[in-house]
Image (spheres, helix red, strand yellow):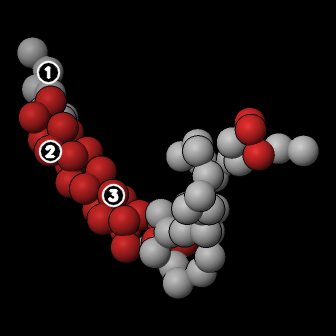
Amino acid sequence: MVEQAYSRTRILVVLAILLMLILADHLKSPTFAFNSGQGNVETALTQRDETACAPCGAPCPSTRD
């Protein structure tokens, strides 16, 4: 009989560790901070019109010309 070179458990553990490292790197990246509105820049999420009806900042149908 041939002995297995890799165990399924060891492969899954290594893949889980790699996934956690990639996720940690992604969450700390400046691009992720910028896309989530934390990059100290004006984004569509931070410059919404407070008087708008829709949550996206669109004007109310009654105020459109």
Residue 2: image tag = 1
Q: Is residue 31 visible?
A: no
Which mark's residue is nearer the viewer, 2 or 3? 3
Left or right side of 65 for 58: left
Q: CA distance from mark 1 to mark 2?
A: 23 Å
Residue drawn at the location 11% of the way across and 26% of the way down: 3
Q: What residue is shown with label 2?
A: 13
Q: Position of residue 34 (x, y in %)?
A: 54, 71
Identify whether 15 is placed above or below 33: above
Residue drawn at the location 47% of the way across and 63% of the way down: 36
Between discs 3 and 1, the one toward the N terminus: 1
Between discs 1 and 2, the one toward the N terminus: 1
Q: What residue is shown with label 3?
A: 23
Identify whether 53 is placed above or below 47: above
Amino acid residing under circle 2:
Val
Between discs 2 and 3, the one toward the N terminus: 2
Q: CA distance from mark 3 to mark 1?
A: 37 Å
Identify whether 56 is placed above or below 21: above
Identify whether 47 is placed above or below 3: below
User: Is the N terminus in the top left, top right, bottom left or bottom right quadrant?
Assistant: top left
Left or right side of 37 for 9: left
Instruction: Between residue 31 and residue 2, name the one nearer to us.
Output: 31
